[in-house]
Each structure stands twice: as structure tokens, then as C-alpha cells.
Amino acid sequence: MIELVSVFSVLILGLDLVNTQLILDPCQVTDFDDIQQAVSNCQKIILKDVVIPEKTSLEMRLLTGTELIFEGNITHVPAEWAGDLLRIYGSNLTISGAPGHVFDGLGAKHWKGKNETVVMRPKLLRFKVSDSTIKNLHLLNCPDQCIHISSSSNVHVSDIFIDVRDGYQGVAPTDHFATNTDGIDVSGSDRIFVQDIVVYNQDDCVAINGGHDLYFRNFFCNGSHGLSLSVSGGEVYNIEFKDSIVQKARFAIHVKTHNEGTEGHIYNVFYKNITFSDVFKAGISIQQNYPQGDVRGNVPITNLTLVDVQGSVLAETVPISVLCAEDACSDWSWTNVRVTGTDFSNECLNVPDGIDC
Ligand SMILES: *[C@@H]1O[C@H](CO)[C@@H](O)[C@H](O)[C@H]1NC(C)=O
Ligand SMILES: *[C@@H]1O[C@H](CO)[C@@H](O)[C@H](O)[C@H]1NC(C)=O
Ligand SMILES: *[C@@H]1O[C@H](CO)[C@@H](O)[C@H](O)[C@H]1NC(C)=O
Ligand SMILES: *[C@@H]1O[C@H](CO)[C@@H](O)[C@H](O)[C@H]1NC(C)=O
Ligand SMILES: *[C@@H]1O[C@H](CO)[C@@H](O)[C@H](O)[C@H]1NC(C)=O
Ligand SMILES: *[C@@H]1O[C@H](CO)[C@@H](O)[C@H](O)[C@H]1NC(C)=O
């Protein structure tokens, strides 16, 4: 195939014809309008320098076993709307980016600082996949959340670089800094293995909203709201975060249950070898009153293990905050947990037996 392409290219270039790529390989696509044709016919697809039209979601329902490769600059025409810029469905897929590629979300055209709640912004990449591999992706300046894995099963994710440094307060123009740029969100999924990830952003580095058997390893997070569970109902269990660094974050570890949510249960959660620095809201926060108000035990938190969790917070910061409803937190084990850098006291409400707070 490759040889054929080059022979034809030479011929066609010689004849000075246009668009050799289109004529020769319908599985290599640049024009947005040609994508669905490739999606229905090809098992190896290269998307290069694609521009997604405004207020449009690029939905790809790939054939089983497809290899999808992104090249060049995958971007969009910015507009105020809510939705996913790219949605990928399928099973037995291999999804990756070629060297030098980027998903440019053009965040600066969307960010409105504190006014974010009234502004509609698209999310960048959503996966609904099974038995698949996602690797080597570079996301730049997500307008809103960066990657969302939902309704997925048995997925290996690795080597992802999420760079929203342009959205930091002090870097972005006043009133135009970024918010809600979650790195990787997971909901309704199981057996998701995520490792070797770098995230510079302005909201959760990882946020688990639902699912079970979810494993996160070797994260470097700068500027985030930490390694989080944010659960408003449902069973969420067998969760592991290991070998990760969290810098300049609002929290390093944050487990929050929504007091206005439904019933649920969080259990078997394991944080191991987490190092953090310059945290400014609370080093470790476990709260059953998210977003605010009274604690409620609608989602009990059972068997929460922390091992080798160490780091520093800024001077006027709560080191550890545990706000549980009565009898709603139990069977926790914390070993070698240390937060330094402040004289502030811990906040402790209905802390399980055996936990130093
Ligand atoms: C998955 O894809 C690979 C490569 O495309 C193929 O060899 C294999 O048979 C597929 N497996 C299933 C279960 O479809
Ligand atoms: C990607 O393309 C858009 C639209 O042409 C452009 O504004 C942006 O600067 C490009 N991004 C990169 C990283 O080259
Ligand atoms: C934020 O909202 C206020 C009040 O509606 C408005 O005056 C201001 O221009 C807005 N800022 C931005 C960046 O949109
Ligand atoms: C982390 O982000 C801050 C901005 O909040 C920046 O000053 C610092 O250099 C970053 N650290 C690294 C290692 O990139
Ligand atoms: C702890 O995590 C760091 C990465 O943050 C890694 O370099 C180190 O090897 C890990 N330690 C152990 C004992 O696995
Ligand atoms: C507690 O959770 C850990 C994983 O974090 C698991 O290995 C262990 O079996 C659980 N303990 C109980 C009693 O379920």
C-alpha cells in the first residue's frame, strides 16, 4: 500500500493534479466531511489536521478492531455551546496520536474566569469503548473538561499529556482564566487502567463519578484540584491511585459525596505513594457535605486506605479535613500519612476509629 501510494504520488505530482491523499487513500482523512466514510469502511484510519465545524460533535462509531491515529492539529471552530467535540465508540480499538500531533481546544476563546457558570463550553474528548487501548495523546487548552471515559470497560490508557497552562490565573488575562478543565473523568465504567499521565489544569486532575475497578498510576498533576472521587449516588468500589505527584493544587486527595445526591456506597479505595506540595485548600479532604452545608450519610465511605501519603500545604491551609456523617465512615486504615507546612488544625467530624485526625 505504501509503495503504491508513493508511485501514484510521483505520477500525480508529475501531472500536477490535486489532493493525492483523497484519491489514493480514503482511510487518511483531513476533510471533516470525509470522516464518516472512513469510519464505516476502514480498520486503520488516520485523521490529520481536522477542523471540527462549530457547534458540532464529531461522533465516530468505529468498526471493531479499528486502529485510529491522530496526526497534526485536530481542532475546531470555537463557539458557545455544550457537548463533546469528539466522541469515540467501539470495541477492540487502538487509539493513538502520532508524534507532533495535538488536540487544540482553543480554550482562550472560551474561558471566562469567574463567569464560567453562565458560559457554554464544549468538552474535548469522550470515549465509550471496550477492550481498547488509548495512548500517546496530547491535549492543549481544553475549553472545559478534557477527557471523559464513560460506559466503558477494560480500557488501557497511557502516556497522555494534558496541557492547560495557558488557563492559569496570572497567565491568562484577568477574567479569562480557565475553570472546570478536569483532566480525566470516569463514570459508569469498569476495569479502566490509566498510567503515565501529565496534567496541568484548573480542576480535578482525575475525577471518578462512578464505576468500579479503576486504577490510576504515575500521574503528575500541577494546578489541579487533586485526585478525586465525586459521587452523588451508586456503588463505587475498587479504586486505586498509586505513585503520583500533585503540585500547587486545591487538594491532593479529595473524596466528596454529594449531600443532595441519592443513595450509594464508596468502598475499597486505596491511595498509595502520593506526594504533594503547595496545596492551598486542604491537603487531604474527605467530605460528606459536598458542595456545602450539612454532612449526610447517603453515600457511606468504607475501607478507605491511605499508605505513604505525604506532602506540604501552604501556611494558612487545613492539613486534613474529614467531615463525615454519623456512622457513615468506617473501616479506614491510614499508614504513614503526613501533612506539613501549616500550624492550622485538622477539621474532624465523625472520624472512624483508629484514624488520627
Ligand atoms: C481485535 O483486533 C485485532 C487487530 O485488529 C484482531 O486481530 C483481533 O482478532 C480482534 N479481536 C476481536 C475479539 O475482535
Ligand atoms: C491549530 O489550528 C488552529 C486553527 O487553525 C490554530 O488557531 C491553532 O493555533 C493551531 N494549534 C497549534 C498548536 O498549532
Ligand atoms: C462577567 O460578568 C459580568 C457581570 O455580568 C460582566 O460585567 C463581565 O463583563 C463578565 N466578564 C467576562 C470576562 O465575560
Ligand atoms: C506548576 O504550575 C505553576 C503555576 O501554577 C508553575 O509556576 C510551576 O512552574 C509549575 N511546575 C512545573 C514543574 O511545571
Ligand atoms: C513513588 O512514586 C514515585 C512517583 O511519584 C516513583 O518515582 C517512586 O518510584 C514510587 N515509589 C515506590 C516505592 O514505588
Ligand atoms: C479493602 O480494600 C482493599 C483495596 O483497597 C482490598 O484489597 C481489601 O480486600 C478490602 N478489605 C475488605 C475487608 O473488603
Image (tube, rainbow, N blue to C red):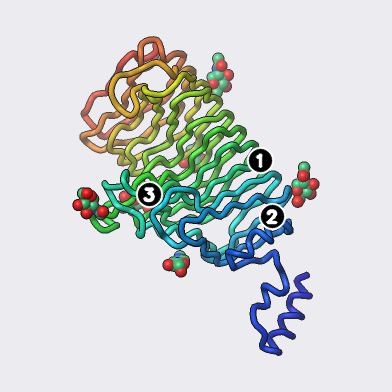
| Disc on res. 120 | 3
Q: Which residue is mark 1?
A: 130
Q: Nearer the viewer, residue 232 or 204?
A: 232
Q: Which residue is mark 2?
A: 67
Q: Residue at x 36, y 55 (%)?
A: 110
Q: Is 241 placed above or below 122 here?
A: above
Q: Is mark 2 within 8 Å of ligand 1?
A: yes
Quarter holding the N terminus?
Answer: bottom right
Q: Residue at x 41, y 25 (%)?
A: 336
Going from N to C along the chain, the mark reached first, 1 or 2, is 2
Disc 2 to disc 3, C-alpha distance: 32 Å
Q: Position of residue 149 (x, y in %)?
A: 55, 41
Q: Residue at x 76, y 80 (%)?
A: 7
Nearer the observer: mark 3 or 1; the answer is 3
Amino acid beneath label 1? Ser
Amino acid beneath label 2? Glu
Disc 1 to disc 2, C-alpha distance: 14 Å
